[in-house]
Image (tube, grey):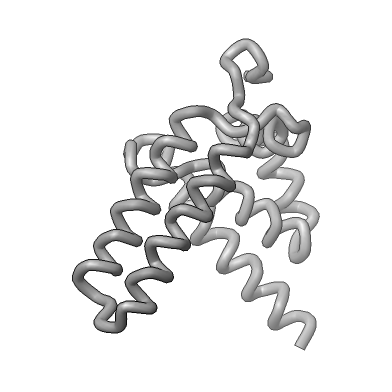
Amino acid sequence: MKQFVKVLLIIIGSISLGLGVLGIVLPLVPTTPFLLLTAACYVRSSDRLYNWLMTNKWFGSYIRNYKAGNGIPIKAKISALIMIWFSFLFSAIFIATNMFLKIGFIFGACFFTVVIYKTKTLKPEDDET
């Protein structure tokens, strides 16, 4: 069972890494949250993959800056907010049939907006890359 969980975490982490890589080139896909998920999966499943990720010249700085308390880049915040509001509003308007669900989607978008707003923003001069 323990080996199954490790393999599952590696698969989830690798999918998340792929989405994070897409976020580097696609403006509406957030990079940092996916890379943080990748790091969380890898740290629990593979020391080798986690060390590779943390020392990687393209991805490592995103995670190290967040872990050091420097925050996340403004681009990541903006793209995350756009994605959250687009998907939550779309769901509230076109998917949810119950009024409570509609209100829940709007509340969820507001909640995540506050969380992202309160997260420190990485200033370019703080970036270690």
The residue under the point 64% across, 19% down is: 127
| Residue 97 at x, y percent in the picture | 25, 82
Q: Is residue 111 left or right of residue 53?
A: left
Q: Quadrant of the N terminus?
A: bottom right
**Residue 38 image position (x, y, % from top left):** 62, 54
In the depicted structure, whether residue 59 falls above or below residue 42: above
**Camera-nearest residue between 90 and 104:** 104
Quadrant in the picture for residue 37: bottom right
Lateral position of residue 56 relative to residue 96, left or right: right
In the image, 92 versus 123, the foreground residue is: 92
Task: Give whichever of 5, 49 is nearer the camera.
Answer: 5
Quadrant of the rendered image containing residue 61: top right
Identified at 49% across, 28% down, the residue is: 74
Kindly tell me whether residue 22 is visible in this rendering: no
| Residue 92 versus residue 16 in the image, above or below | below
Q: Position of residue 49 (x, y in %)?
A: 70, 53
Outermost residue on the top side: it is 125
Estimate the x, y position of residue 15 in percent, counting from the top left. 49, 61
Please state if 98 lies on the left or on the right of 107 as rendered.
left
- The residue at 54%/29% (across/down) is 73
Residue that extends furthest to the left in the rendered view of this protein: 94
Residue at x-position 35% and y-position 52%: 85
Can you say whether 24 is above or below 10 in the image? above
Outermost residue, bottom direction?
1
Quadrant of the drawing holding the C terminus? top right
